[in-house]
């Protein structure tokens, strides 16, 4: 197996990780108490919080105001920035000897003093199996998931394993209406087909790219999918981001855990 490639880590991060490996076994985690207990019951131990960051300058792409279209240059920028943050988080987890990272949060941060600069931060808890078996991805990288500790336990108990937090993004310019169209619709309940089609197309592009990522790594399916919209470039340009966890069934003979009904007491 070839050595996995990661985005480079700053020296301060490397120093913190080395100290964690050489010091006493005192882990850090953003898991709740219930999540921590369930993760250990699943046969994994937390190693520490890991993170990745990418501060990215986003260029300018002009678009005709009369045409609804994807802004491909911006879509690529947003995707690359997130991937760099994710890759650095994976590198930190790999250095700790983790099998995977759970509870991943990937969020954008804007800076008022840099209007064309955005930072993406990926944070999660690195975990390692206690049974001595490796559960990393076939490419040697730790698995990543935004699933909570409770959802990870449920997935594991049914024989499934997270593979990667997959994503698809699309920055889309929605065409302006003409003054005549705006006046004709004033005070009238009616669909806006131009806007409907543009938003529909943008979401479909984000969803299809997320699904393609899952197919590329050989996933059986994607769980925990969400599609969110972000407004970064004024009133008529939106980004749609689709995220989910690609999963594989690694133990088909596992007996499913039967849920228990709990009635609230009054």
Image (cartoon, rainbow, N blue to C red):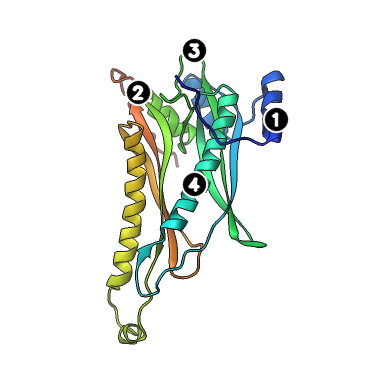
What residue is shown with label 1?
Answer: 16
Q: CA distance from mark 2 to mark 3?
A: 17 Å
- Nearest the viewer among 261 and 73 is 73
In this picture, residue 211 sits left or right of residue 8: left
Q: Which quadrant does the N terminus fall into? A: top left
Q: How many C-alpha atoms fall within 10 Å of the one at disc 3: few (<14), some, or many (≥20)?
A: few
Q: Which mark is residue 80?
A: 4
Label pair 2/3, CB-CB below 8 angstroms = no
Give the mark, 1 or 4, whose residue is nearer the N terminus.
Answer: 1
Q: Is residue 93 above or below residue 202?
A: above
Please tell me which of labels 2 and 3 falls first in the chain: 3
Tell me the tag on residue 159: 2
Kind of element beneath mark 2: loop
Identify the residue position indicated by label 3 in the image: 132
Q: Specify which label sits upstream in the sequence, 3 or 1.
A: 1
At a point 41% along the width and 30% down the height, the residue shown is 162
Q: Secondary structure at mark 1?
A: helix
User: How many other residues sit within 10 Å of disc 2, few (<14), some (14-19) or many (≥20)?
Assistant: some
Q: At 31% across and 59% down in the image, what residue appears?
A: 201
């Amino acid at each position: 197996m070839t050595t996995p490639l990661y985005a480079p880590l700053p020296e301060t991060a490397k120093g913190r990780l080395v100290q964690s490996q050489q010091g006493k076994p005192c882990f850090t985690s953003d898991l709740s108490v219930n999540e921590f207990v369930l993760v250990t019951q699943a046969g994994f131990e937390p190693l520490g919080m890991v993170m990745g960051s990418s501060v990215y300058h986003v260029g300018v792409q002009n678009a005709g105001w009369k045409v609804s279209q994807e802004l491909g240059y911006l879509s690529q920028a947003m995707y690359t920035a997130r991937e760099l943050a994710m890759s650095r988080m994976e590198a930190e987890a790999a250095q700790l000897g983790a099998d995977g990272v759970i509870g991943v949060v990937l969020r954008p941060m804007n800076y008022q003093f840099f209007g064309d600069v955005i930072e993406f931060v990926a944070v999660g808890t690195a975990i390692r199996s206690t049974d001595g078996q490796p559960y990393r991805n076939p490419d040697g990288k730790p698995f990543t998931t935004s699933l909570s500790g409770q959802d990870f336990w449920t997935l594991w108990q049914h024989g499934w394993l997270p593979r990667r937090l997959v994503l698809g993004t699309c920055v889309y310019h929605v065409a302006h209406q003409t003054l005549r169209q705006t006046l004709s619709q004033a005070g009238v309940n009616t669909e806006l087909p131009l806007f409907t089609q543009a938003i529909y197309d943008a979401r479909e592009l984000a969803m299809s790219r997320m699904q393609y990522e899952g197919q590329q790594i050989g996933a059986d399916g994607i769980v925990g999918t969400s599609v969110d919209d972000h407004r970064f470039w004024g009133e008529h340009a939106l980004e749609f981001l689709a995220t989910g966890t690609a999963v594989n069934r690694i133990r088909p003979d596992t007996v499913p855990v039967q849920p228990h009904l709990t009635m609230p007491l009054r």
